Amino acid sequence: MPRPTTAQITYGSVTVVFSTLAMLLLSQTSSGVGIAVIALAALGLGLLVALTVPFPKPAAPAARTLPAPTEERVPAQRGVLAESVASETAAHS
């Protein structure tokens, strides 16, 4: 399981604090059991909120691309190259 993100921790913590305060103020309870139940409910709600914040999608691994195909260079034989250069220079003269 991946680690929780900063957003998940923040949203969960804020939910716990605000829902605890809201439930304590609305219920006006003063008993220890009532406060414990409200605290557990707020923790459960905070956990639910933290888990529903979507995880960021992992970056796709960089695709290994092959270099662009280059022309296959085959060394020419000196005799053939010399003849073609000589015939080209003779044609241009």
Image (cartoon, rainbow, N blue to C red):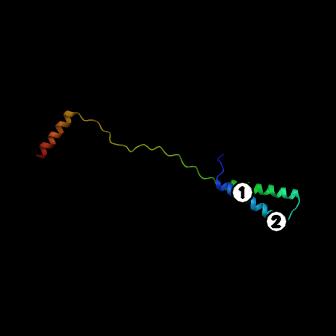
- Element at label 2: helix
Residue 9 relative to residue 30: left or right: left
Q: Residue furthest left?
A: 93
Looking at the picture, how far across and down is residue 82, in whole percent?
Answer: 18, 36
At label 1, counting other C-alpha atoms closer than 10 Å, the crowd grade (few under 14, some 14-19, many 20 or more) is some
The alpha-carbon separation of the residues under discs 2 and 1 comes to: 18 Å
Query: Mark 1 sits on what residue?
Result: 13
User: Where does the image place residue 72, in percent across and percent down from the top left?
Assistant: 32, 39
Q: Amino acid at mark 1?
A: Ser
* Badge number at residue 73: none
80 sits left or right of 21 in the view: left
Q: Nearer the viewer, residue 28 or 59?
A: 28
Query: What element does badge 1 sit on?
Result: helix
Can you name the residue that lies furthest to the right here? 31
Q: Is residue 52 above or below residue 72?
A: below
As rendered, which of 4 and 70 lies closer to the eye? 4
For image coordinates 35% across by 43% down, the residue present is 70
Task: Tell me the residue at 15%/39% (across/down).
Answer: 86
Above/below status of 12 relative to 63: below
Tags 2 and 1 in contact by the CB under 8 Å rule? no
Occupied quadrant, residue 76: top left
Say which mark, if any, is on residue 25: 2
Q: Is residue 76 left or right of residue 52?
A: left
Residue at (60%, 53%) from the top-left corner?
Answer: 56
Position above or below: 82 against 68: above
Q: Quadrant of the N terminus?
A: top right
In the image, residue 32 lies at what x, y percent? 87, 57
Left or right of 3? Residue 92 is: left
Counting other residues with Cα less than 10 Å from the Cα at mark 2, is it few (<14), some (14-19), or many (20 or more)?
A: few
Residue 50 is drawn in which quadrant?
A: bottom right
Q: Pinpoint residue 14: horizontal percent, then vertical percent.
A: 71, 59
Q: Amino acid at mark 2?
A: Leu
